[in-house]
Image (tube, rainbow, N blue to C red):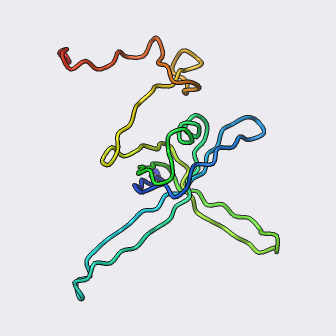
Amino acid sequence: MAIDNSVTITGNATREPELRFTPSGQAVANFGVAVNRRWQNRQTQEWEEAVSFFDVTAWAQLAENVAETVAKGTRVTVTGRLDQRSWENQEGEKRSKVEIVADDVAVSLRWATAEVMRNERADGGGGRPSGGGASRSDAPPPYNPDEEPF
């Protein structure tokens, strides 16, 4: 039996993504997402609201794309896995936190528009994207609504 550790949340970015690079040159971006939940209390008929805050970490090309695209307040959907980190603070107290390590981050088109620019692939094949905003020469052609799909 396989155990899956996956999570998807939709909410608003609470801060600008912070883009950093590891000593080996790997990009990493950290940002926060607030998820609002609203419901009606059946006993009082009053609307109640709760907010959950999540820290999100994105790696590699996704990190660079997030840093370039997401701003504080942007509505995003994050898909990834939960990861728990533990450490000791300067006073020697043990601390831990659960964060989302993103596999994908998408902006919501419900309240905004977006311009999509494909990244070039450095390997010219099926590898991970890396770099700029132009499309690859072997990328599929853009959708043309006047052409028959089959």
Residue 90 appears at what percent x and percent y? 82, 70
Of the pair 123 and 109, the residue shown nearer to us: 109
Q: Is residue 105 left or right of residue 28?
A: left
Q: How many marks?
A: 0
**Location of residue 149 in the rendering, given as x and y in whole percent from the top left corner:** 20, 18
34 vs 17: above or below? below
Q: Please give the name of the residue rendered at 33% of the width and 43% of the height, measured from the top-left corner.
A: 109
Residue at x 56%, y 24% (from the top left corner)? 132
7 left or right of 91 in image: left
Image coordinates for residue 26, horizontal then vertical, percent: 69, 37
Q: Give the image quarter of residue 37.
A: bottom left
Residue drawn at x 35%, y 39% is 113
Residue at horizontal 77%, vertical 69%? 89
Image quarter of the C terminus: top left
Furthest-top residue in view? 137
Q: Is residue 103 left or right of residue 107?
A: right
For the residue pair 124 and 51, the one nearer the viewer reads as 51
Quarter of the view holding residue 15: bottom right
Q: Nearer the viewer, residue 17 or 147?
A: 17
